[in-house]
Image (cartoon, rainbow, N blue to C red):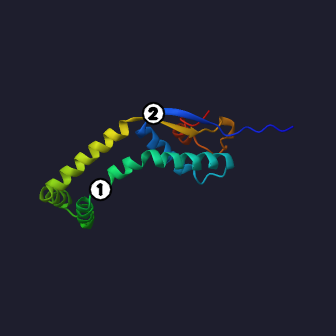
Amino acid sequence: MTITKMQTKMKVKTTRKELVELINTLFALSSVESKKLALMVSKNIDSLKTHLEDVEELATPSKGFIELTKCVQEIPKDAEDLKERVKELESDNVEIVSERVKQLEEVEKALEKEVEIELSTISEEDLPETVTGYQISGLKLVIE
């Protein structure tokens, strides 16, 4: 008789900010060769995307801000008057800049919101030997 351990799930109550940190860690681990880790990564990325899509939409800059950013990027990085030119662009576009600041404040509030989510877990013994301490730290919500 063979007994195989099924991948388990658990409900987690945490902030969206911590979910963003988790999804970033999962994306970083997506190329690590380990079937069990790959399954957990894939399932959780799908679930996290669903829980974070409204925050992503909220964080999307306006067309005006994107255009302003392009103007800033056109200034040579080694220009002696770089700071002055950026400040001038900002002062010429006060409304666009203030809207973006307000938008980012709303994003920060949304990230602090606590949510409950069901995540696939992985046991310590199923983690590959190549996983780093930094990566393990990022996976703390899903290690059982």
Q: Few, some or many C-alpha atoms within 10 Å of disc 2 (few <14, some 14-19, many ≥20)?
A: some
Q: Residue at x 38, y 48 (%)?
A: 54
Numbered disc 2: secondary structure: strand
Circle 1: residue type: Pro
- Please name whichever residue, 117 or 73, is drawn nearer the observer in this view of the structure: 117
Residue beneath label 2, please? Answer: 14
Name the spot of residue 140 as percent of width and height, x first.
54, 35
Number of numbered markers: 2
Residue beneath label 1, please? Answer: 61
Most extreme residue toward the right, as rendered?
A: 1
Q: Residue at x 32, y 41 (%)?
A: 108
Asked if the residue under mark 1 is in contact with the one under mark 2, i.e. CB atoms within 8 Å, the reply is: no
Distance from label 2 to label 1 (Cα)? 26 Å
Q: Is residue 7 left or right of residue 97?
A: right
- Quadrant in the picture for residue 115: top left
Name the spot of residue 24 as percent of width and height, x first.
48, 47
Q: Quadrant of the C terminus?
A: top right
Name the spot of residue 21 as percent of width and height, x first.
46, 42
- Please name whichever residue, 72 or 117, is drawn nearer the observer in this view of the structure: 117
Q: Is residue 97 above or below residue 40?
A: below
Q: Residue at x 43, y 46 (%)?
A: 52
Circle 2: residue type: Thr
Disc on the earlier residue, 2 or 1: 2
- Please name whichever residue, 51 or 125, is drawn nearer the observer in this view of the structure: 51
Numbered disc 1: secondary structure: loop
Name the spot of residue 130 as percent of width and height, x first.
64, 46
Q: Is residue 65 left or right of residue 111?
A: left
- Please name whichever residue, 111 or 89, is drawn nearer the observer in this view of the structure: 111
- Quadrant in the picture for residue 70: bottom left
Q: Is residue 36 above or below residue 80?
A: above
Q: Quadrant of the N terminus?
A: top right
Q: Is residue 18 above or below residue 86?
A: above
